[in-house]
Each structure stands twice: as structure tokens, then as C-alpha cells.
Amino acid sequence: MRIKILLAEDHKIVREGTRQLLEQSPDMEVVGEASDGIEAIQFAADLHPDIIVMDVRMPRLNGIEATRAITARFPEIRVLILSAYDDDSYVFPLLEAGASGYLLKTSSGAELAEAIRLVHAGQKALASRITEKIVHRLGGRGFYQSAEMSEGLTEREMEVLRATAHGQPNKQVATTLGISPQTVQVHLRNIFGKLGVGSRSEAVAYAIHHGWITLEVNDDPNGG
């Protein structure tokens, strides 16, 4: 059986080129093309692909949110990121969202096809630059920690900070994460203390500056 692939990419010419590359492989079939994250979720439900080759920066819904939604609803579908960007603010949130691989658009057609086969077999497929980032982050300082911080932020603290960055009040953050508003306040106090800031806006600005989160994933008209 051929591997069924859905392409999620907002540039038509890139989708067409990727389709042509992949369809040269007799074990692969492109079953659909999505131009944004909303369509990717819809087509995942309708077409049941084996693999989604997902861009990061797309209109309406970015690749991070689309990946998170698809892996939660359809755990049998593997997501392989294909992006021009290797920023930490994309790489780590995408891997946390459940992506099985991350390639850069500088990859060859043969590398993309091999990555699809690896991901389809249940393995990880990472560009060498992405692997280096992971090794550096795990082997040295804390996961979310700058040079001036004595202690890094935890995953839960980052979840709180990301929700805060998108304007969610404490009560909504609590509901989203399944914790109490009081616990959210405790996390925010810990975040402020670790970052040496005194407000939500300062904490969000700090995290954006260090590439831990981004508010611009949907804003780039050039895609990526």
C-alpha cells in the first residue's frame, strides 16, 4: 500500500512542486492539498492521510495549532513539518504539539521522501540543525532558561505564559490547563521571579525576545 500524504502549505507553487517530487516515489500518493491550518484539520478528518507534510506559517491557523489539533484528534496521523524556519519559537512548540519530524525547505526531494518513510514507520525525522538544537537544549542549560536566569521555566510555566501571551485571563488559563485560578497566580508569580520582571506584558516580551514564544506565526504574508 502507498503512503497517503496530505500537503498543508499556503503557497500553491510550493504545493505543486512538492507533489511532483513525492509522486515520483511509487510508494507515495498525495491525496489532498490544504492552503491553511483550518483546511488541514478538515482534510485530515475527511481524507484520513497517513502523513501530513505541514508548513508552519499559514493564514487563518498556523502549523503549531493545526498540529496540536490533529495529533489530539487523530493520533494515528503523523505530522512532518517542512519549514523555512528553524527558530526555537517554532521548533520546540511544534515538537511539543506532537510533530513526528521537522525538515527545512532546503532539504532535497530524496530527503523529504526518506523522512516521510521514517515517520510512517513510527520513527522521528529531524534535520541535522534541529537535532543540534535539541541536543544543545537538553545537554546544557534549562529548557527555557537565559544566561542571566538562575533557574529555567518549567513546561507548565511555559504553558501558562503562552496562554497569557494570547490575552487569556487567569480564569480562562485555568480552564484551558485544567488547574485552579489560584494555581495560575502562583505560576505567574514564579515566572515573574525567575525572569526578574513585574508584569505579564514584561514576561511575554522577555519570552518573545528569547525566542520561546511568538505572536507572529500568522502575520507573515510570505508564509514559511
Image: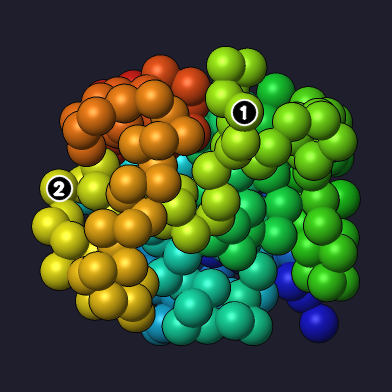
- The image quadrant of residue 100 is bottom right
Give the side of residue 185 with respect to residue 207, left or right. left
* Contact flag, marks 2 and 1 (Cβ < 8 Å): no
Q: Residues within 10 Å of mark 2 (few under 14, many from 20)?
A: few
- Picture residue at 79% right of the left edge, 63% below the top: 119
* Mark 1 lies on residue: 150
Q: Nearer the viewer, residue 46 or 161?
A: 161
Q: Nearer the viewer, residue 179 or 150?
A: 150
The three-letter amino acid code for the residue at tag 2 is Gly
In the image, which disc is placed on residue 167? Answer: 2
Q: Where does residue 128 sit, x and y in percent of width and height?
A: 85, 31
Q: Where does residue 63 sit, x and y in percent of width and height?
A: 43, 50
Query: What number of labels is visible?
Result: 2
Q: Nearer the viewer, mark 2 or mark 1?
A: 1
In the image, which disc is placed on residue 27? Answer: none
Q: Where does residue 83 sit, x and y in percent of width and height?
A: 57, 34
* Relative height, residue 11 to residue 43 (above, below): above
SS at badge 2: loop
The three-letter amino acid code for the residue at tag 1 is Ser
Looking at marks 2 and 1 on the same chain, the residue that comes earlier in the sequence is marked by 1
Give the side of residue 179 with respect to residue 109, left or right. left
Q: Where does residue 152 sit, x and y in percent of width and height?
A: 59, 38
**The N terminus lies in which quarter of the figure?**
bottom right
- Picture residue at 46% right of the left edge, 41% below the top: 56
Q: Nearer the viewer, residue 84 or 205?
A: 205
